[in-house]
Image: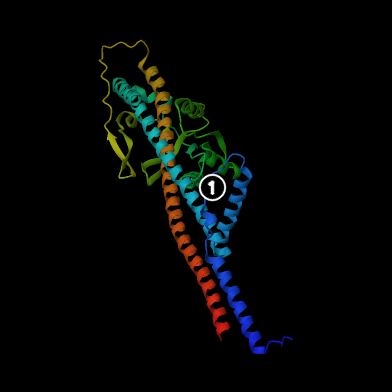
Amino acid sequence: NHEPHSPPTQLVTMKFLFVAATAIATASAFTTSPAAFTTSVPQVGGVSDVFSQEGNAHRNRRSTIVMDGKANAIRDRIATVNNTKKITSAMKLVAAAKVRRAQDAVLATRPFSETLQSVFGGLINRLGGEAADLPLLTQREVNKVTLVSITGDRGLCGGYNSFMIKKTEARFKELTAQGIECDLILIGKKGISYFTRREYPIRATYDCTQNPDSKQALSISEEIINSFLSGETDAVELLYTKFLSLISSTPSVRTLVPFSASEISQKGDEVFQLTSENGDFGVERKELDVAEPQDFPNDMIFEQDPLQIVNSILPLYLNGQILRTLQESVASELAARMQSMQSASDNAGALSKQLSQEYNRARQASVTQEILEIVSGATALEG
């Protein structure tokens, strides 16, 4: 016959079992199984064993992670932010490469522009006051103005498009307030979509590609010249973004038609060059002198009338000016995109650092909470 245990003996036995169970649970939570870090070499005919071992290792590895759902969410967000930073950094480098391409395009057009300016200046000096009778050089009373606005086709370039749109709106309202009728020639999808939704009077629309060429500039210049010569408009103003540096661009306004003979023959030019130093991009601007007018002796006989030659040079000059402003606007857009992507990369880096600190705090809090629970349980049992 066995006598039943006394109540104190039963209580001691239950305490011992509870402490042993707690110790086993703690050991399993903080002990890493060797199988989690063992690499097995597959043998011929042992494919199923390999997959089973990998599955066990994966389960064991996940079971060793001691953290709550908040830490896991922060960890996933850190990975997303880092991926975004890689994308924005790549977009910055792509924009920098395109800026250099735009720079090369501007330099490639310089010889033609200099020769055209030199010939025009020489012909104006030869003709004197006779050139003022040309239709494209004739100033007339302004009752209607056509605004040519250049924006971009895409976003992610900071305030580039919004600045140009606001400048165009302000100029439109200014002329309208003076009683001058206005319409628009829009270049770039962003400007087209904005002014079309607001039902502004639009004469023509064109896309602004990343690589403007002479064919695109020719179609725009023909529309401008035809509108002016037919009397549909009395003046044409161009609104574009003047490229100053990688961090600065200025919305500018200039009169395209009618031309000013003195401005064509006496206006200098400037070119920009993309540079890099210590991993940072920069821009160097260089002022170019006015091309010297070509000397045409008085006894030189022209096969065509000099007035006809000047009249044929003016559309070429307009075509070159539009191509140049398109290239400068594209360079300004790409520079704005570079700056925007740099800011996005910097913000992503700062956010990643902040999230890493939050992740470490959450992890530490989770581990500390586990330790406190274990110590509290042991203290309660001892008491």
Q: Nearer the viewer, residue 116 or 21?
A: 21
- Residue 159 horizontal/vertical position (percent): 46, 48
Residue holding disc 1: 40
In the displayed structure, does residue 67 sit left or right of residue 293? right
Give the residue drawn at x 39%, y 45%: 250
In the displayed structure, does residue 251 sit left or right of residue 231? left
Q: Nearer the viewer, residue 195 or 276?
A: 276
Q: Secondary structure at mark 1?
A: loop
Where residue 99 sits, quadrant-wise, is top left
Q: Quadrant of the C terminus?
A: bottom right
Give the residue drawn at x 28%, y 30%: 290
Identified by mark 1, the residue type is Ser
Q: Quadrant of the N terminus?
A: bottom right
Is there any visible trace of residue 240 in the rendered image?
no
- Residue 339 horizontal/vertical position (percent): 41, 47
- Residue 28 horizontal/vertical position (percent): 56, 66
Q: Vertically, is 81 above or below 296?
A: below
Total marks in image? 1
Q: Nearer the viewer, residue 248 or 28?
A: 28
